[in-house]
Amino acid sequence: MTNKNLLVELFVEELPPKALKKLGDAFAGVLADQLKAQGLAAADAVVTPFASPRRLAAHVTAVAARAADKAVSQKLMPVSVGLDASGAPTPALLKRLAGLGADASAVAGLKRAPDGKAEALFFDSVQAGVDLAAGLQKALDEAIAKLPIPKVMSYQLETDCELPGWTSVNFVRPAHGLVALHGADVVPVKALGLKAGNATHGHRFEAAVDPVPLADADAYAATLAKDGAVIASFAERKAEIARQLAAAAAKVGGGCKPIDDDALLDEVTALVERPNVLTCQFETEFLDVPQECLILTMKANQKYFPLLDAAGKLTNQFLVVSNIRPDDASAVIGGNERVVRPRLADAKFFFDQDRKKTLESRVEGLGKVVYHNKLGTQGERVERVRAIARAIGQQLGGDVLAKSADTAARLAKTDLLTDMVGEFPELQGIMGGYYARHDGLSEDIAFAIEDHYKPRFAGDELPRTQTGVVVALADKLETLVGMFGIGNLPTGEKDPFALRRHALGVGRIIVDRDLPLELGKLISIAYETFAGKGLVPQKDMQGLLEVLCQERLVRLLESEGNNAGEIGAVLAVQGMPHWAVLRTRLEAVRAFAALPEAPALAAANKRIGNILKKSEGEGAEVNPALFVETAEKDLYAAMQATVPAANAKFDAGDYTASLQALAALRTPVDAFFDGVMVNADDPALKANRLGLLKSLHEAMNRVADLSRLAA
């Protein structure tokens, strides 16, 4: 059987750049999976995806011309249905065999095997392996059907038949070529109204020949690069762009580096086939505008790479990734410099105009902007955030922090009414900080306005100041309680208000900033600010919201390498005052779990918990005079010697030492369960022993619910 490498390419019009990498990976992945499923490619076949602005392709190693035949055993029907009392085949069996291409002569070769409670008949046959043409056709159809296409286009193709006419084709972009090569042989498959061939097309302007003939499947990438002036591999093109960007920045000197933005790099990689990085510049007067504005307009509108100096400050030079390599690039450079200038001028105009009005003067305008039809205006929302911020600020820092948090919360949303944020919504908060400084407000207030959306995403920085922390918490709590209160809960597929991100932000701020705040009380404070808004009852909403926040927090802690069982053990503790102690307690549990005594004590703790659940309401104060067995006397004595010290360490916040002190109880606990009958016939004896176990259970579970660590 002949095994050769396979190359399949779809040549199309320019594909959507933000989806290109995903489209390329999906096309190659599904195609290869289908070939493997049909036995045409081995499970360890190497799959190489290719994706450029005008092509999706896949190279698969060691693909067979025909799949191997395989034995198939098919269940026909129960024996009682297929054979009559004399053992002769029934009409039903003969009909089924005929459908499989067999006749009555096959009855003697049928196998009997148990099938549940009955016995069934099975027909063994050899299924011929699929040939490559049929198998690849199926794989190609499947790969096209399963492409994660953002939006389908419909276009017309002339029909491939004797009668003239047109047929409609639906695909992400109009397709103009199909290549399918098994080694050097063309595989006769069709797709999107196209027949497979052995030639593709290169760069629109710089290809050496057109079309570009391909000698065989393995020559694809090299031939396209040489004759087509195209780097077909997305990964190789991305690496080449990154190399050229670094080289161009080094040539500028001064420690300059292109801005680090992998999403922008991916998008530019999807826009060019033959990258050529050029250095451009703009007038230094534009550097008076906040660099975030200039960077955003160059990235978002022009796909340029701004250059930052060694201190991270924006320079007046930027890098362009061109798709052509002219001998004289001055026209390309000049054209890009002319294009960017009006963008920067607009940013400067917006910045100058916005500073003519103070943030304070914009507060009233928030009352005219609808936040949500069920929750009122942005002005009403700001008043709720202020109330929450004052309450949190008072708790964390008294009147001074409450006052500064109130000021920042009152002004935090005013930049939504500025021209700059109207043009670039991504700059909300950031521009508010700049305008606050221009208005003469303190750095503390400016930082709080700038940071109150943080963390914006997983791994983002937290607010830099205590005032910023308070306002950020208040803003997120107001959003969570309001949206949960009107029933806008996130689902598995949709979270349009980014409530999961807000919930994670609340958890991160409390845990990372070691804030002595209880989530339940924070939610209650926020809920009280929505008077008259018709929210669902607080008790119904609060439970769901606490679950979401805890789920997000668990995900965060797991991402940091914490064990899920240990996280659950800490969070299961009743009456834990706040999340600020989570990481410290997790460290203590991790240290305890490493002790040789830990498994036995965790198992004992679980056993004690089960006993106490079954005996709910029973148990009394421990009376040493009622002890009968030596084991219960020894356990009580060990607890008297150990628990006070463990409690002292716990109260001092040394959770690791507290848990490790309890490790000394392993031997007396084991002896207790080996030698003492808890459910004694004497009610007083039973109650005393339950009381002993209850006090032991409470002592062991102050840091974490140790039963969660049991295997």
Image (cartoon, helix red, strand yellow):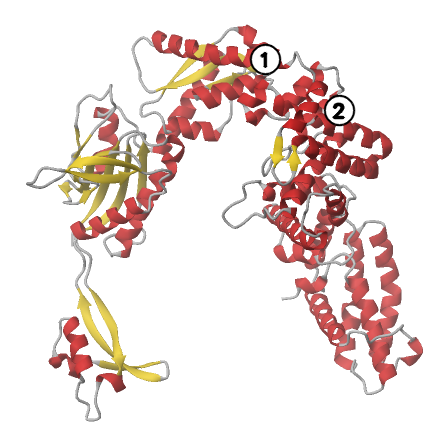
**In this orientation, which residue lies closer to the viewer: 711 or 446?**
446
Q: Quadrant of the N terminus?
A: bottom left
As drawn, the residue found furthest toward the bottom would be: 86
As drawn, the residue found furthest toward the right would be: 625
Which SS class for mark 2?
Answer: helix
**In this orientation, which residue lies closer to the viewer: 566 or 633?**
566
Q: Quadrant of residue 335?
A: top left
The dot on residue 52 is: none
Q: Position of residue 471 (x, y in %)?
A: 72, 33
Instruction: Look at 47% across and 10% down and name the residue there.
Output: 341
Mark 1, residues whose alpha carbon is within 10 Å: few (<14), some, or many (≥20)?
Answer: some
Instruction: Look at 63% across and 35% down and name the residue there.
Output: 455
Check if mark 1's residue and mark 2's residue have beta carbons within 8 Å.
Answer: no
515 shown above or below 654:
above
Mark 2, residues whose alpha carbon is within 10 Å: few (<14), some, or many (≥20)?
Answer: some
Q: Quadrant of residue 123?
A: bottom left
162 shown above or below 562:
above
Label 1 – label 2 distance at C-alpha? 22 Å
Instruction: Please state if 682 lies on the left or on the right of 56 as rendered.
Output: right
Q: Earlier in the sequence, mark 1 or mark 2?
A: 1
Instruction: Look at 79% across and 76% down and name the residue there.
Output: 672
The dot on residue 289 is: 1
Amino acid at dot 1: Val
Which SS class for mark 1?
Answer: loop
Q: Which residue is mark 2?
A: 444
Q: Quadrant of the C terminus?
A: bottom right
Residue 258 visible, this orientation = no
Instruction: Please state if 610 lies on the left or on the right of 629 as rendered.
Output: left
Amino acid at dot 2: Asp
Residue 212 visible, this orientation = yes
Q: Position of residue 408 (x, y in %)?
A: 74, 27
